[in-house]
Amino acid sequence: LGTLPALAPASGAEPGPPPADATDLALVPRPAEVALQEGPGFVVAPTTRVVAAGDAAPVGEYLADLLRPSTGFEVPVDGAGSGDGAVELVVTPEPGLDETESERYALAVTDDGVRLESPTAAGLFRGVQTLRQLLPAQIEAGTVQAETWSLPAVEIADEPRFAYRSSMLDTARRFYPVEDVKRYIDQMALYKLNTLHLHLTDDQGWRIVVDDLPALTEIGGQTQSGWAPGTNTGDPWFYSKADYAEIVDYAASRYIEVVPEIDGPGHTLAAQAAIGSLNCDGQPKAPYYGFDVGNPMVCATPENAANVRVYLEKVIASVAAQNPGRYLHLGGDEVPDPPAGWYEAYTATANEIATAHGKTIVGWHQWAQGSTLPAGSLMQYWGVASRNRPTIGTANESVDVREVRTALAAGARLVVSPADRAYTDMKYDASTPYGLQWAAIVNLRRAYDWDPLTELSSTDGSVHLATEEQVAGVEASLWADRAYRGSSSLPTSHDQFIPPAVYTDHMTFPRMPAIAEVAWSPAGRDYDEFVQRLVPHGERWTELGYGWYRAPDVAWE
Ligand code: TNX
């Protein structure tokens, strides 16, 4: 490696020693290929420009916005001009790429500048996150820092392993104001996630506006998990159409697609409290704010089929109108012992209407049991892998395993979120003040040290449920049943309800970056090497104001 830059540092601190190897670059998720180069690298200076035209322009503006507060530099964004001494972002379209290939990027830092190239703006945006992580952690600060903004000389060629890299917010159990959703979107963006799954409806609440059915949000916007009706003294807990559009647009500006979830035919008490005709006796249920799962389901008898259809048509039409994305998640989890035909009737109707609205269906893996899946459907595996794996390939395969087989046989692909790995509402350890532990205690190693294909294989590795091609992606699922202090029992006071971002930050950092790497990086990862790369991110999270958890299984700086 060469000497440090001759260019005068902007001010303040001396640059640190050059990186000895790729691990020292502390990139998360780990890129596919990293080659350190000879030479001092590049220093972002007061004269540094961003060159970005056409499709690259919004990504150039995003990068400049990222650099300005902490550098104090002007960072102009030019549509034209040479890349010399600049950070140049280029979209070079390539026909015929598949989804993962279209997010690939190539990043070269030389002594003369930076060049980032991708076939799409989305790929460029992922590459900008790599560039960001190559800069000192102080780049995340909101005020001007005395720092030398060195970038090491390096060539990176990167591409995601899986196309669907998701994180879920459970807005039904705990309502997140728009600002908190945006904060979460930015947290996802830093780790190259591209899908925000919003769990918008459940027993404890209904958060999205439906035309002609205002009772859904009028009544469903008054409850949260553990928080009784009539006790919300602030704004109602739902997203107006303007709020929702703001979320979708903000996500799009980070090249993140929103996947709305309307859960059913169980987890529907909020709807059943608002619309009497969803119940067999025609009477609305009481609004619900407890914790039980397996509550009464939508009445899906043949006699009530017309009412269920009207409900689904109105709901899906409104949700489709507010969500430009490709997917609609229809839920389908935890309906214990449905009367014969009910589950089938509900899923068939929902599939038909969602398809008519041009949506690709996502469901929890049980959904595939209901009725014929439309082409391209994604089924989300949320089983406890440590319990299911030992049964794979035996005469007594667990129910989950059989359901996954049904889904795959029907042509679905999988989104993999094993509850004992990827559920970020699980406690890290017994002392975690929030969350649950029904699936497992999920420390950082458990969150990181797994592979989607292995979790779907027998313990001895001889029987595989799915091929690599049948795995669409991975999700970190942040449920919010118990997003309050003292989660072993019902809250006795609203003081136990911490601000939602406190919960999210704590449960997400450091585990979401670990799951993001499972989704992005090539197979064959190593936990200890990951931890070396992750530890410097702690400083970044602190600069960003994230209330991250200093997980005790890691030697944080
Ligand atoms: C199971 S996962 C559920 C959710 C809970 C979660 C809590 C799934 C599809 N259903 O209703 O919030 O466990 O960990």
Image (tube, rainbow, N blue to C red):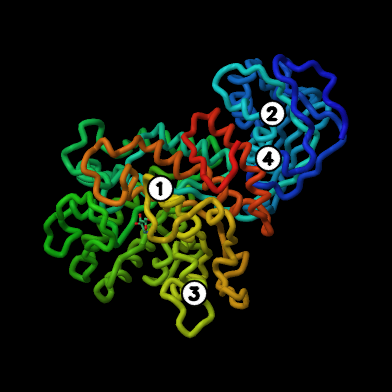
Q: Nearer the viewer, mark 1 or mark 3?
A: 1
Quadrant position of residue 147: top right
Question: How far is mark 1 from mark 2, CA to CA?
Answer: 48 Å
Q: Earlier in the sequence, mark 1 or mark 2?
A: 2
Amino acid type of the residue that numbered disc 4 sits on in the rendered structure: Ala
Question: How far is mark 1 from mark 3, CA to CA?
Answer: 37 Å
Q: Nearer the viewer, mark 2 or mark 3?
A: 3
Q: Nearer the viewer, residue 289 or 217?
A: 289
Q: Secondary structure at mark 4?
A: loop
| Residue that protrudes farthest toward the bottom in the picture | 395
Label 3 CB sits under 8 Å from any ligand 1 atom? no
Quadrant position of residue 361: bottom left
Q: Which residue is mark 4?
A: 26
Q: Which residue is mark 1?
A: 431
For the residues labelled 4 and 2, say whether their Cβ atoms are less than 8 Å apart: no
Amino acid type of the residue that numbered disc 3 sits on in the rendered structure: Arg
Q: Earlier in the sequence, mark 4 or mark 3?
A: 4
Amino acid type of the residue that numbered disc 1 sits on in the rendered structure: Ser
Quadrant position of residue 533: top right
Image-based side of 454 in relation to 476, left or right? right
Q: Position of residue 426 (x, y in %)?
A: 42, 53
Q: Which residue is mark 2?
A: 52
Q: Secondary structure at mark 3?
A: helix
